[in-house]
Amino acid sequence: MTAARPLIEFRRVSLRFGAETLYDGLDLDVREGELLCLLGPSGCGKSTALRLLAGLLPYDSGSVTIDGATPNERWRDLAFVFQNPRLLPWRTAKENVTLGMELRELGLSRAEMDQRADDLLKLVGLEADGQKYPRMLSGGERQRVSLARALAVEPRIILMDEPFSALDPNTRRRMRRELVDIWQRTGKTIVFVTHDVDEAMELADRIVLLSPKPTRVIETVSIEDPRPRSIGISIGLTATRDRILAGFHESPTEPVS
């Protein structure tokens, strides 16, 4: 049987900023329904890849497609979750969730938007906090509101740009577990940017390891272990983690063996 075409494809993508080459023939793909992590050192263009996917940045050559179309043609299929939750301080948690629906003009009535917001706040564990303002919520709770807002527009793909990096370690671990649970329940395709190897291994179906600039894919690593994952206990995960860490020190043009 022929494998299904990837939902997202980067093919020979090149991108320069002035005299600096960021991408030099970048190739990668994302399968529908998977949780894929882009992992690499700071400055290698992980967040830039999300901006290309969202059609927010032009590239010099190659192609970026979403289900065979350009990002600008598929923008309604996408939603973003940023490192900073970017909630409006004068709107309650529930009103922040409905904001995306209002801006996208989905044709929903106010009652339908309110019901969807209530359902999603329940999904992210904030059913009792819909009337709170962002200042009344913890960092993890604000990020859950941001995720609920992304889900509210019913995207096929959620782009997550280091959404847990500003949280304390305990909250970060809890948010990872909750994200996996929400992803499994919704079936969304998630592209998750991180520079944390352990985070990528806890979350991902596959990890795309990126080189320093000019950026190429060093290796794509499939993580087959069932979730929840404990890297310190599993010998296989520990070995994979060590190999990925070694990949950061490989030449950007030489694949990890």
Image: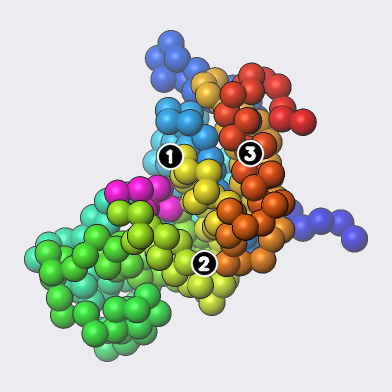
Give residue 210's position: percent from left, percent from top.
58, 33
Q: Is residue 130 above or below residue 78?
A: below
Q: Amino acid at mark 1?
A: Ser
Give residue 247's position: percent from left, percent from top.
63, 30
Q: Is residue 111 above or below residue 242?
A: below
Give residue 117's position: percent from left, percent from top.
31, 79
Horizontal side of 221 relative to 155 (left or right) equals: right
Q: Which residues are magenta?
A: 160-167
Q: Residue at x 54, y 77 (%)?
A: 185
Which SS class for mark 1?
helix
Q: Amino acid at mark 3?
A: Asp
Residue 163 lies in magenta, yes or no?
A: yes
Q: Residue at x 67, y 44 (%)?
A: 240
Q: Quickly name the residue at label 2.
A: 180
- Mark 2–mark 3 Cα distance, whole angstroms, equals 23 Å
Q: Quickly name the residue at label 1.
A: 47
Which SS class for mark 3?
helix
